[in-house]
């Protein structure tokens, strides 16, 4: 009951003071502004019991809302930065791999053409998953080769496949793989040969 008496006395006292102040100030353009301010203060005095009932602290609510928005915004920004880093790293890795494939093709292509009469159609490089990013290393290199044939169209002849042809091709593959291995300074197991058209 004392709270209610205290609240009513505050309102009456403030209205009394506002009336005295409004009578003391001269009649000019500031009178409307001063009455508006006093009206807002009286309105807040009327809302004071609601604040006490719900025990709402506006400062805490505002700071909590701002903190939650800031933390959510910070998480979103961190995720976006992480996604961009991954995307940039992937495009950089793809570019490096493409340049490495071109370099390997230039290094090996001429040698294979001159020595074995085969051309490199495609190269596929698998990189080692290493802990350090400083020196990426090739784990496996797959070469797709094609016999270098003349462009002239020749009539089709009867084809006979001797039984030793498969063995000759395997021996030739091993010889080509050894040559590539020595040119690229890779272990022989890391070089794989495939032929265009099977």
Image (cartoon, helix red, strand yellow):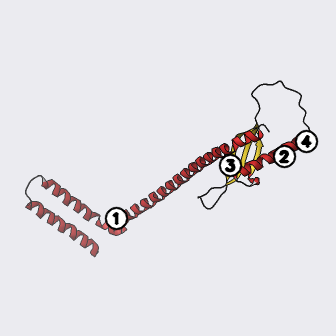
Q: Which residue is painted at 14% across and 66% down in the image?
A: 17
Front of the two marks 1 and 2: 2
Q: Do the residues labelled 4 and 3 touch (CB within 8 Å)?
A: no
Q: Which of 104 and 85 is in front in this view?
A: 104
Q: Name the side, left or right, on which 29 lies relative to 95.
A: left
**Mark 3 or 2, nearer chain start:** 3
Cα gap from disc 3 to disc 1, whole angstroms: 63 Å
Mark 1 near mark 2, Cβ–Cβ under 8 Å?
Answer: no
**Which residue ends up furthest to the bottom in the rendered image?**
2
In depth, the one of 71 and 159 nearer the eye is 159
At which x and y percent is residue 140? 71, 52
Q: Nearer the viewer, mark 3 or mark 1?
A: 3
Query: Distance from label 1 to label 2 (Cα)?
Result: 85 Å
Contact? badges 3 and 1 (CB < 8 Å): no
Please state which of the two labelled residues, at mark 4 or mark 1, is closer to the viewer: 4
Where does label 3 land, which residue?
Answer: 125
Kindly report the distance in space between the C-alpha atoms of the residues bearing marks 3 and 2.
23 Å
Q: Mark 4 points at which residue?
A: 164
Q: How many numbered callouts? A: 4
Q: Are marks 4 and 1 in contact (CB under 8 Å)?
A: no
Query: Which is in the foreground here, disc 4 or disc 3?
Result: 4
Which label was assigned to residue 58? 1
Which of pointers 4 and 1 lies earlier in the amino acid sequence? 1
Q: Is residue 42 left or right of residue 188?
A: left
Secondary structure type for disc 2: helix
Residue 171 badge: 2
């Amino acid at each position: 009951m004392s709270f209610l008496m205290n609240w009513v006395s505050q309102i009456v006292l403030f209205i009394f003071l506002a009336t005295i102040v409004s009578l003391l100030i001269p009649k000019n353009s500031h009178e409307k502004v001063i009455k508006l301010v006093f009206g807002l203060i009286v309105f807040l005095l009327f809302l004071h019991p609601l604040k006490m009932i719900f025990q709402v602290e506006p400062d805490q609510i505002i700071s909590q809302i701002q903190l939650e928005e800031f933390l959510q915004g910070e998480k979103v920004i961190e995720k976006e930065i992480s996604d961009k880093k991954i995307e940039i790293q992937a495009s950089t890795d793809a570019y490096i791999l493409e340049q490495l494939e071109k370099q390997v093709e230039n290094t090996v292509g001429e040698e294979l053409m001159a020595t074995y009469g085969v051309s490199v159609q495609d190269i596929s490089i698998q990189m080692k998953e290493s802990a350090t990013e400083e020196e990426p290393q090739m784990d496996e290199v797959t070469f797709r080769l094609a016999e270098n044939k003349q462009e002239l169209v020749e009539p089709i002849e009867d084809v006979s496949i001797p039984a030793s042809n498969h063995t000759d091709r395997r021996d030739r593959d091993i010889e080509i793989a050894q040559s590539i291995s020595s040119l690229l300074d890779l272990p022989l197991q890391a070089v794989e040969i495939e032929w265009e058209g099977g």
